[in-house]
Amino acid sequence: MTTLSEYDDVRLIWTDLNGVARGITLPGEAAAHASEEGVGFANGVTELTLEPGLLDNPHNGAEGGDMMAVPDVESTMPIEWADDTAAVFTDLTNVDGSQFDLCVRGALGNVLEDLESAGYRALAGVESEFSLLSPDGDGGWVPYNDRCSYDLDAVDEASEIIADWSSAMETAGYNVLGVHQESQPGQYEVNIEYDDALSTADGIMFFRHMVNSITRRHGHKASMMPRPYSGEDANGLHFHLSLWDLEVSENKFASDTGDIRFPAGKHPAGESGISDDGRYFIGGLLEHMKALTAICAPTVNSYKRLLPGIWAPVNIAWGPDNRSTVLRLPPELGPSTRIEHRVPDSSCNPYLGMAASLAAGLDGIRREIDPGEPTLKNAYDEDYERLPRTLWTALDHLEDDDVLRDALGPALVDSFVRIKRDEFNRSMDHISEWEREEYLDEF
């Protein structure tokens, strides 16, 4: 069994509402001592904005006292790029030991407990896309290369960086399924093998910390900004979700009824499809999709990604192996049956994104929500409801969604909405170069 005292240094990590990893580095012995009661932080720092700054009316102000970051020792993983150093993820509690109401990891834990009480164990895999940038010599940054989808020269050119990324993830206990050049210059995707939903969310946060640290050591920059450049595709964080029995021996989405057509076939061929649980799960996601968008696409910039024509999800529909919909049913069925949720982007807080998505799916199962017929057509050309066009509108839907509000906790949702409305308001106070070019000489 891992003990924190085995390491010279331990990084205690917790995640704020924006999805930013925060924490403290302690000597191993001190970290081990903290494993019982945790380490205290002013509880207001969970509500830092990305500016950064504090809100005028936070849930916890200067008078709010402390929260405790309590290490989940089972989540300990070695940090390969730092000598004799480990990372451990923490849950936030009040000083009296009760759950802190703005703890995003705790919010996911609550949803997973709800799922288990209903007889399900949630597994999740991720596709993490990001932009690899190089210095331009003038203090700015440009895409690392000028290549596009699956270009092997792009992988070869970055082979040393990629090897370091992969090795660090493997050392931490995560299986990297593959790394490839994505569709636009400097854009890469790293796929991490599925695991239980909490371990996967921890893995996303570790991956972000790792890829930034290692890339910086190579003299470059990794950015999780959803759409860093105009005219180009953007960075997603697709969730692959499935529900299993409590022993993780049976995929509850799998079915031997092959009643769904796939455009290019399926595996296994023949009598394989998706179960009623899987359909209802899809129905719940579709039902709550507008509210989910606020959490899965949580920045002003996120809505520059959600546009038709760049293979991003726009229409609230589902389809077999269909990348024009918000939900895709991959053609690998049987034990591999899963739902690909394509709305989350690279800025999504993985704990909140997973928690909200699983809560929406469970609501669909409980209420037996019919998702309707899947589409084999290009959903961009069909008459489906669209996702919200702005963060502000998505937040309106989140505030009105009682299921997600109850699942995540009213205080957490209220604080998240306040932080994100503040972000939107600050964006409205800045004028872009496009606006000046479009309007300055015209009126």
Image: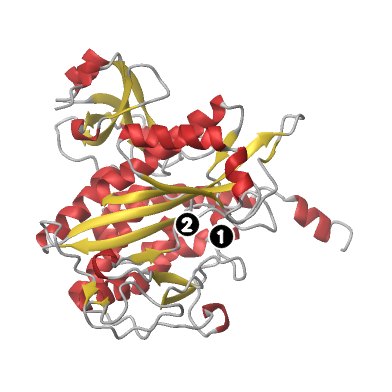
Residue depicted at 38% across the width and 53% down the height? 126
Tag 1: amino acid: Tyr
Badge 1 element:
helix
* Residue denoted by label 2: 297
Q: In front here: 61 or 413?
A: 413
Image coordinates of residue 58 in percent, x first then y, are 39, 41
- The answer to whether residue 247 is left or right of residue 270 is left
* Residue denoted by label 1: 303
The quarter holding residue 103 reads top left
Instruction: Note whether 217 is above or below 407 in the view shown.
Output: above
Tag 2: amino acid: Ala
Image coordinates of residue 90 in percent, x first then y, are 26, 33
The CA distance from mark 2 to mark 1 is 7 Å
Image coordinates of residue 162 in percent, x first then y, are 51, 37
Q: Can residue 94 be spotted in the picture?
A: no
Q: Are marks 2 and 1 in contact (CB under 8 Å)?
A: yes
Image coordinates of residue 224 in percent, x first then y, are 52, 44
Badge 2 element:
loop
The tally of labels here is: 2
